[in-house]
Amino acid sequence: MIDLHTHSLLSDGELLPSELARRAEAKGYEAIGITDHVDASNIDFVIPRIIKACGMINKYWKIKVIPGIEISHAPIEEIKNFVRYARKKGIKLIVGHGETLSEPVIKGTNKAYIEAGVDILAHPGMISVSDVKLAKRKKVNLEITTRKNHLKTNRHVINLAVKYGANLVLNTDTHSPNDLIDNKYKYYFLKKLNLNMLQIKKIENNSVKLIKC
Ligand SMILES: [Zn+2]
Ligand SMILES: [Zn+2]
């Protein structure tokens, strides 16, 4: 199991990064990305702390923990700058908080994250055909999510990604310990979305590629 979108109490998650990593490891995770919400108010608070915590965990434990962020509700005009800044500061995994239907995300946010070259566009809601085509060109992974308030549009995202050849990844957007899943649930969840084993393997490979960078 590789999960590249989770939150610790550095933003609105319930667990310390170490406890989140330990619980994931106990569930059989091979790797986890810890991607706390950031905007201009807390980006300089979160980045050094998540890098420090991940560094220590990776030194001693088997699970690989990737220091990430989820840029959230950023002004569209600033998204490129956030991405550039975070990479310069050593962040290895950048998630863009996409246009989920459950929050008033500004229209055009999906496109701005794709253009800025984030690693994953999270919960992209009713993403447009042109944005899916752009995601394919820019090699931005589109997220399938197990999180209840975002999962209604999974089928739409999958249909367009399959049709236009964009990459997909599966993440949990964990905020609480019970949000973590295991491999068995992952297969159950993806099969229920009518994905076949070949497509599921491809989705897994997309996550593998992201933990190698
Ligand atoms: Zn959150
Ligand atoms: Zn999130």
Image: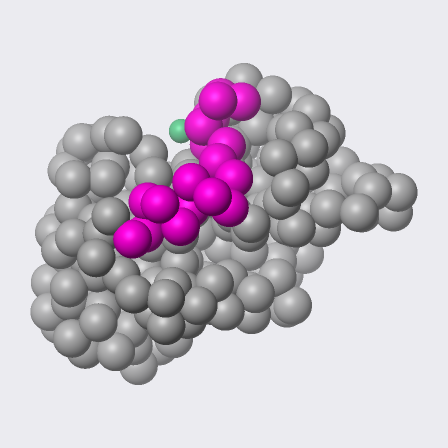
Q: Tell me: 202 left or right of 177.
A: left
Foreground pick, 203 / 126? 203
Q: Residue at x 27, y 61 (%)?
A: 195
Provide residue 184's location: percent of width, then percent of height. 47, 43
In this view, which residue lies farthest toward the top? 14
Decide whether residue 114 is among the magenta residues.
no
Provide residue 189's location: percent of width, then percent of height. 33, 45
The coloring applied to the image is one colour
**Does 183 sit above or below residue 200?**
above
Q: Residue at x 24, y 48 (%)?
A: 192
Decide whether residue 187 is among the magenta residues.
yes
Provide residue 105's location: percent of width, then percent of height. 20, 39
Q: Residue at x 68, y 33 (%)?
A: 26
Main SS, magenta residues: helix
Image quadrant holding the C terminus, namely bottom right
Q: Start and end of the magenta stretch?
A: 174-191
